Image (tube, helix red, strand yellow):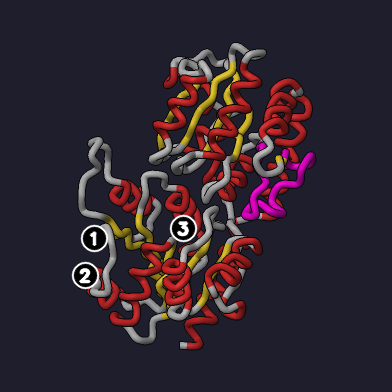
Amino acid sequence: MRVTHLIRASAGGTIDRYLLTLLPALLADGIDVDLVVLASGEAPADGSSDPAEQLCRAAGALGIPATCQAMPDRLGPVLPGGLIDLLRQRQPDVVHTHLTYADTAGVLAARRANKACAVVSSRYYVPDSPYGPLNRWFQRWLWQRIDRGLPVSEAVRQACIEREGARPDRLTTVGYGLSLEALRVGQGARAVLSAELGLAEDAKLVGILADLESPPAAATDALKAFWQVSGQQPDLRLLVIGDGPGRAVLEGRARGYGLAERTIFLGWRRDTPAILAALDVLLLARGQASLLAALEAMALGTPVIACEDAGLAGIIANGETGLVVPGRDVDQLTSSLALLLDDSDLSATLAAAGQAHVAKSFPIAQAVSGTRAVYEQVARRR
């Protein structure tokens, strides 16, 4: 079985990071996998390393053949020939796409390269904002050309059906799988991060991980909760992991709360697991990163407080494996944060229960077997 995975690398790298766990596990299971990373071809304006090149290097270090393919920022009806040529050379049985840009490129290129090739698409999150008419039409167009969708949860599956027009018989739920070995970051994560940021090792660290959309409503709620708790805890620091057009707004609000010196904006980081492991509490704003971030933090033994989100339904049991706060209830978010920072026994209990839950319910072997079964089904039908 030959499978080519297709993704457009991003600075945030949330799904990129997951592929670095999934692909080696699929390879170990006997599936001939490779990775094509779609890149804009332009160097980042800030001079940092290109995300596509970073992902290719990381995949190659794990034994996964990886290729960067230059692509335009926006796809039109005529696809550049480079991707088609790559797939013609590779002749995969399945092209497995990740996120909308790669879905579109994969649908346009796979059948032109090989009419017998099946297209599988992973779906990772429930969008916060409603679809407009054009987006709804486009999603239906995509689903008519995708052989099988792999939503990561039942909530995402329902969204694919109700909001995007996907056929239920073309959807198979395959949850995230985590490798605790791959996530293990060592006992020194807290000391390393504290030294990097110039903080005392006994400083308490609260983290937010979110795409900072504009306006960054959910992240603003978390910031307000931190502000309301911080007056009683002078050693408390807030780490904001993420970036986007709403970052400047959030930075302004942090200054307005008098938190400029106590809020550290980290941007997107490739070492997110090490940061999650160093936190005392992770606050999850709503958005596409939430489900994987929740599972990673729990696996690393970090207690999680999550705003109620359809994508997290069934993942965190309130009061058992973490704390869940209804919608935009900032007062409850504040009281939950204060509770975990003050009650170390409760924090440790939730952390241990969350870690056990992830180890039992989200093993990488489960994701591999589910994914492999889908590959075999769609390849036979072709």
* Residue named by callout 3: 24
* Residue named by callout 1: 72
Q: Nearer the viewer, mark 1 or mark 3?
A: 1
Q: What element carries label 2?
A: loop
Q: Do the residues labelled 2 and 1 touch (CB within 8 Å)?
A: yes
Q: Where is residue 161 in the image (x, y as percent from the top left)?
A: 59, 72
The image quarter in which residue 206 lies: top right
For residue 88, side relative to residue 31 (left or right): left
Q: What element carries label 1?
A: loop
Q: Is residue 284 above or below residue 37?
A: above
Q: What element carries label 3?
A: helix
Q: Is residue 99 above or below residue 1?
A: above
Q: Where is residue 325 in the image (x, y as percent from the top left)?
A: 71, 40
What type is the residue that disc 3 sits on?
Pro
Q: Few, some or many C-alpha atoms within 10 Å of disc 3 (few <14, some 14-19, many ≥20)?
A: some
Lower sequence index among marks 3 and 2: 3
Label placed on residue 12: none
At a point 63% along the width and 14% down the height, the residue shown is 231
> Dominant secondary structure of the magenta stretch?
loop
At a point 52% along the width and 13% down the height, the residue shown is 200
Q: Distance between the residues labelled 3 and 2?
A: 29 Å
The image quarter in which residue 318 lies: top right
Q: Nearer the viewer, mark 3 or mark 2?
A: 2
The magenta segment: 304-323
Label placed on residue 80: 2
The image quarter in which residue 108 lies: bottom left
Q: Where is residue 316 in the image (x, y as percent from the top left)?
A: 71, 47
Quarter of the image with the N terminus is bottom left
In the depicted view, which residue is nearer to us: 360 or 27? 360
What type is the residue that disc 1 sits on?
Pro
In the depicted view, which residue is nearer to us: 327 or 34? 327
**Residue 31 seen anywhere in this rendered image of the structure:** no
